[in-house]
Image (tube, rainbow, N blue to C red):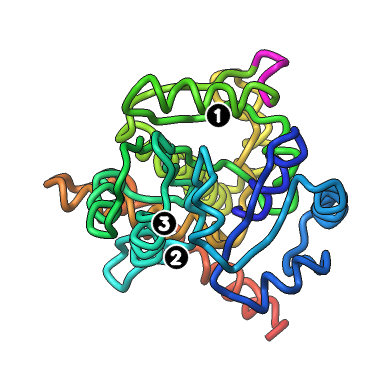
Amino acid sequence: MGLVTGACLAETGNDVVCADIDAGKIERLQRNDVPIYEPGLDEMIRRNQAEGRLTFTNDVGASVERARVVFIAVGTPANEDGSADLQHVLSVSKTVAPHLRPDAVVVTKSTVPVGTAEKVRAALQEGGVKVPFSICSNPEFLKQGAAIDDFMKPDRIVVGVENDIARDVMAELYAPFVRTGNPVLFMDVPSAEVTKYAANAMLATRISFMNAVALFCERVGADVNHVRKGIGTDRRIGPAFLFPGPGYGGSCFPKDVKALIKSGSEAGLNFDLLEAVERTNERQKLVLLDKLKADGVI
């Protein structure tokens, strides 16, 4: 996510420095050896490095000193209790704190639970920030395998801001990406933080719902593909994420659903719906195995 963000922002004419403490990763990127696969990403990185708009360094402090916008784009894996592990986000915040230029905008791009912005602010202050700054939440909505298209031609861009300085800076930064009319949705910071989790939880809910319907169809002799088409053509519903299968997985949906359930619990709310979504998904993982056993494949 961080690499795609940096490359796409460079592609639209910004001077971008991607910083990481992993010297081996930086050395590879400086040689245009991209450690992940996204269609078109290697060529975009090569071109923008050659034209001087994109550079890579492991000197995090120096890269921050001249940055108008500082994106934090690090992993937030799930803890054992389902909460998001923010240690990397907060560590980066402390690292960049003494190097920020006046009126810099610090943007959390990582997927983080509501309330993280204030933790980032506290970490910046603990790290010795010396200048006025703004906090911004700008969650990503990138699909693996289509990340560049999603970034360059977004459905919408969600930006949580706390003041007009951050709003103006982010509006200028994202102006090239919304020329066709798709919106930049400015909102308060907590709402932006919730939006990412809510979006992933909604998509996960559709998957679990359709898998539950598929099991019901088997019991009553209905064809789930006919049912899927029958409800997917309703404009209020649409066809996306209605394919029955082995359940949702990947790097986002499982941890984000768990994190939203955990955040709800911390706020005194039982997320019964999402708990059912998660139970349905766990059950669905065994359905394919049971079918293979029943057919004598294993």
Kind of residue at disc 3: Val
For residue 246, the mark is: none
Q: Residue at x 72, y 47 (%)?
A: 7
Disc 1 secondary structure class:
strand
Q: CA distance from mark 2 to mark 1?
A: 34 Å
Instruction: Categorize mark 2 by other alpha carbons within 10 Å: few (<14), some (14-19), many (20+).
Output: some
Q: Of 210 and 192, which appears nearest the observer? A: 192
For residue 96, the mark is: 3
Q: Residue at x 68, y 61 (%)?
A: 56
Kind of residue at disc 2: Arg
Q: Nearer the viewer, mark 1 or mark 3?
A: 3
Question: Which residue bears the numbered disc 2?
Answer: 283
First in sequence: mark 1 or mark 3?
Answer: 3
Q: Residue furthest top?
A: 181
First in sequence: mark 3 or mark 2?
Answer: 3
Q: Nearer the viewer, mark 3 or mark 2?
A: 3
Q: Is there a contact, CB below 8 Å, between mark 3 and mark 2?
A: no
Question: Which residue bears the numbered disc 1?
Answer: 157
- The magenta stretch is 177-181
Disc 3 secondary structure class:
helix
First in sequence: mark 2 or mark 1?
Answer: 1
The quadrant of the rendering that contains the C terminus is bottom right
Instruction: Categorize mark 3 by other alpha carbons within 10 Å: few (<14), some (14-19), many (20+).
Output: many
Q: Residue furthest bottom?
A: 298
